[in-house]
Image (cartoon, grey):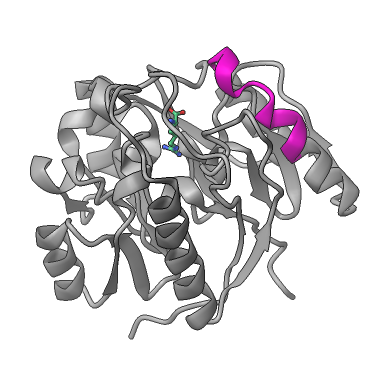
Amino acid sequence: MREATPRHYLMCRPTYFDVTYAINPWMNPDKPVDAALAAEQWDELRRLYLDHGHTVDLIDPVEGLPDMVFAANGATVVDDRVLVARFRHAERAAEAPAYQEWFTSRGYPEVHSAEYVNEAEGDYMVVGRTILAGTGFRTDPRAHAELERALGRPVITLNLVDPRFYHLDTALAVLSDTEVMYYPGAFSPESLAILRELHPDAILVDEADAEAFGLNAVSDGLRVFLPDTATGLARQLRDRGFEPVGVDLSELLKAGGSVKCCTLEIRHPAAV
Ligand code: ARG
């Protein structure tokens, strides 16, 4: 039997959300964004988390930072130890100090700022004791050793090769402490071999569901929150005993983000 465990999330309201620059292939500044609709869709995601018993904290959005809604990129938190992001693009650089300040002012004992570019949970996925770490488009491979030092967890490097899946959280999702799902086409042959070895029972996701951002999903161990257009994947999840919860974040997708991108998980030390 699968069981949900209550989670602690940090989210950022899309008050200043817009697509004014293009730093991934999904973004087109010429295509209009409906800010009111984006806000409604984001509110619905937050409401779903709360309805399912999770805690959602909020960080104040900052004017002039249209991508700040993608909170997953702000920091990586394990055992209350925090490694703050360092963004690849100048357009997002100022988000990092906002996260640094959020965690510091709340008394988190270790808040590390990063020397190397890392886009936090965009590229870092915690699976049980291990962290799978993406590189290729955003996070600097040298950041992986820095992550290991800062958070004290073993880190495994995975190379991303398809620009549509520029962050690891668009290509792979964590379902439980031992299970993942991923789109094989997003990885180099060597990284694929590592994934096959580590996770022989992983759910393999097809290109259509990956393009629908189906892998940009959040699992609480039972429920899997994911874009409602990834219908084939929802079926695969049901077959494995998960409960898919479809969410419509079509406006945020115009910036190349969805469910997981909007969600930073704060992991506390396990209770003894
Ligand atoms: N427009 C944002 C960027 O390109 C989207 C970030 C999506 N976040 C994520 N965790 N994949 O940086």
Decide: is 33 above or below 89. below
Residue 90 located within the stretch drawn in magenta: yes
Depth check, front residue: 122 or 16 = 16
Residues drawn in magenta: 88-99
Q: Quadrant of the N terminus?
A: bottom left
Residue 200 located within the stretch drawn in magenta: no
Q: Residue visible at 20% across and 67% down? A: 237
Q: Residue visible at 66% across and 24% down? A: 146
Decide: is 265 above or below 92. below
Residue 131: image location, x then y, percent: 51, 42
Asked if residue 126 can be seen in this view, the reply is: no
Quadrant where ligand 1 appears: top left
Asked if residue 24 can be seen in this view, the reply is: yes
Decide: is 162 above or below 233. above
Q: Quadrant of the C terminus?
A: bottom right
Q: Residue visible at 67% across and 57% down? A: 58
Q: Residue visible at 90% across and 53% down? A: 107
Q: Main secondary structure of the magenta part?
A: helix
Residue 82: image location, x then y, percent: 73, 43
Residue 93: image location, x then y, percent: 64, 21
Decide: is 157 above or below 90. below
Residue 74 lies in what quarter of the image?
Answer: top right
